[in-house]
Image (spheres, grey):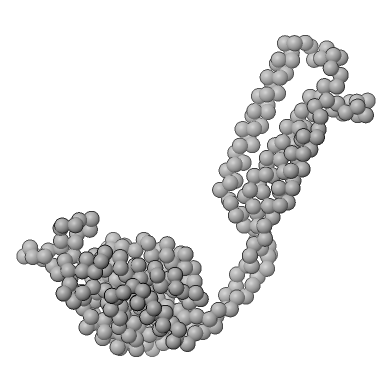
Amino acid sequence: MDKIYFENIDLFYALLLLPCLLFVYIYYAKWRQKTQDKFADSSLIASIIPSYSGKKIFIKQFCSLLGFFFLIIALVNPQIGSKLKVLKRKGVDMVVAMDVSKSMLARDVQPNRLTKSKLMVSKLIDALKTDRLGIIVYAGKAYPQLPVTTDYAAAKMFLKTVDTDIVPTQGTAISDAINMAVDYLESSASKNQLLYIISDGEDHEEGVDEAIKTAVDKGIKINTIGVGLKKGGPIPIKNSNSDFKKDRNGAVVISKLNDKLLKEIALKGNGNYLELNSIQGAVDYIMGNITETEKSEFESKRYADYEDQFQWFLALALFFFILEACIPDTKTNWLRKYDLF
């Protein structure tokens, strides 16, 4: 069945100009009639100017309105797609789980841990071609951010919204993130699936080992990426450059990279641990993992490219504009005896 798509749908608002034009035409017609009545009676006008045709003026204005109508539809550009294509692709399904706890605001890496993580994921999205990507955010609880998809534009759009306020509960629920990744990849036809956990590893909760085992049993390889420095840094209060998180004794809390935990997760998850020092280096590393991973072939159905239909409406617009220009204001000689116009 054919599907209709409008390329510039916002231009439909231009149709509101047509009632304005109609109002102008009616106002002009009334003004002309009023002026004419002041000059002479309509029967006298007909005898003085026998070639005058009020109906033709109406027809010309009607043609002009139709011309503008079809011109606007042409600018909207209706498109029709009727062919259903089956597209085959080879790729790997992967999920990126991003830690958005408050400790990710620490500036021991510039500009801060979370921003650096987002820059790396953004560059990774730019490098992907046929692989599907999903995004999960987590702190005290995991939340879905983007389902597994090849819509890289949507991935970058959702990535921009990631910040430490997106998850209200604080902590580092890595187990929740792993379980959610398993749910993401449950229906995947890919034989080999990848999970990348980006975190500083701090304040992690229990139950990680069980979640890792579930993921490994499902064929998911868990890789971890550590963000931050071992010497650590203070956690700034959001929107403040000089105020930092303090403990109960009033001492500034220092957040440190817990690479030991992240290495253990990667080891148990049959994956690898990488420290995020260079953004491009991390992207190259992940793309290398994808290249080495056996890719599966997938089929996806979608409509073929839509075909433009604006030319038909443009032709109609030109026809009515030309017709309006060709119709004279006076009666046509050979039609006068029929008094049609």
* Residue 78, placed above or below residue 201: above
**Residue farthest to the left?**
249
Q: Between residues 127 and 329, which one lies in front from this camera angle?
A: 127
Q: Residue at left 60%, top 75%?
A: 87
Q: Between residues 166 and 96, which one lies in front from this camera angle?
A: 96
For the N terminus, give its image quadrant: bottom right
Measured as percent of width and height from the top left, residue 110 is found at 25, 66
Q: Is residue 99 left or right of residue 152?
A: left
* Residue 30, placed above or below residue 223: above
Q: Residue at left 71%, top 48%?
A: 313
Quadrant of residue 25 within the rendered picture: top right
* Residue 164, placed above or below residue 35: below
Q: Is residue 326 left or right of residue 157?
A: right
Measured as percent of width and height from the top left, residue 282 is found at 35, 77
Q: Between residues 137 and 308, which one lies in front from this camera angle?
A: 308
Measured as percent of width and height from the top left, residue 2 is found at 68, 62
Number of numbered labels in the structure image: 0
Q: Residue at left 88%, top 28%?
A: 332
Q: Is residue 29 left or right of residue 222?
A: right
Decide if residue 165 is in sight here: yes
